[in-house]
Amino acid sequence: MATVSAHRTMTVVQLIPALHSGGAERSTLEIARALVQAGHRSIVVSAGGRMVEQLEAEGSRHVTLPIGRKSLATLFTVGKLRDLLRDVQPDIVHARSRLPAWVGWWAMRGLKPRPHFVTTVHGLNTPGRYSAILMRGERVIVVSQTLRDYVLRHYPREVDTARIAVVPRGIDTDAFPYGYRPDDSWQRAFFEQYPQLAGAPLLTLPGRGTRLKGHADAIELLADLDRRDIDARLMLLGADEPGRESYIAELRALVHQRGLDDKVVISPQRADVRDVYAMSALVLQLSRRPESFGRTVVEALALCRPVMGYAHGGVGELLAELYPAGRVPLGDREKLVERAAELLRFAPPIPPPRSYRLADMQSATLALYAEVVQGVPAA
């Protein structure tokens, strides 16, 4: 494709399975918004979801196609996507998940002019031929140094360092303002809803209802603090999800066994996570499996709230850079309670965020798009 002016309007089509919730989905909306604000044309293809309304309200077009459904019927979406691409003639097709990447790759075959292909690896996917499609991007975006190392280790022949771009996720500092505290009316409503959380420092572990998030470790931590006569409360924020009833029952049984019924809340997802973080004495990130990034770490630190987490994966990477006092060896129960006690007694000061900001992520991604369209070689 010919070199274009830096000021030319781009058309970018992002491919993602659905737009219900999640980090990749949120990044899709954030880049779509940045494209529109910069005067470009933004199109997102997915099976739909609750985030579509916001996407369209912010100026992007949404096209409903089930490109992420693991079914033979997904093959029939290839022709429909090819028709769309032929119609809109995008400069870039940006795939953010494996199956949509395959659908996009097949749909682009034979197109003239052929769009540029960009991919993002959002997670530590199981290595193999199925995942390797994400290495075919002219640029392969990864969201952390941890993920860059993972990709290079498992796909040394499929991708080279020049094509990989580390573009960390960013948080909106207007949505998570430094030093924010919820107002009195919110606090009254919160403690009326959860009276057992009042009267002691609050520990909050955000995460969906899966045992990989370390909910049991958080419960054992509270029990260990209790045995040391350190009074605290625990909120497992967002763990109570539909379809996870048996797992939640296990957690409630563990809470009861440890005598903590009056100190623990297991909540569904909430829209006011910022307020909950801001009320917390300590935000926990205890995932047993390494995470590719760890957005909750940055969100809590942006609010000037201490974070403690296992020192592995993207979470360990972030803590090492932004809040070393919060790092604990994976699964080390003794170190976990010792560090929690230290941070509850005195948490080192947290400076205002100067990195991992939403604007940084948006500008880096749009700059990468412009380089690809202009034919600038990967550095």
Image (cartoon, rainbow, N blue to C red):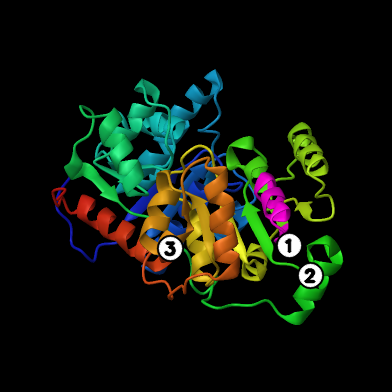
Q: Residue 304: say if magenta.
A: no
Of tags 1 and 2, the one toward the viewer is 1
Residue drawn at the location 83% of the way across and 42% of the way down = 256
Query: Which amino acid does the dot numbered 3 rest on?
Result: Tyr
Task: For the residues labelled 1 and 2, say whether their Cβ atoms are less than 8 Å apart.
Answer: yes
Q: Quadrant of residue 159?
A: top left
Q: Which labelled disc corresponds to residue 199?
A: 2
Q: Quadrant of residue 212?
A: top right
Start-end of magenta stretch: 219-233
Q: Amino acid at mark 2?
A: Gly
The residue at the far front in this view is: 228
Q: Nearer the viewer, residue 102 or 247?
A: 247
Q: Residue at x 79, y 56 (%)?
A: 263
Q: Position of residue 361 (x, y in %)?
A: 37, 60
Tell me which amino acid carries mark 1. Asp
Helix, strand or loop at mark 3: loop
Q: Write down the residue under mark 3.
A: 323
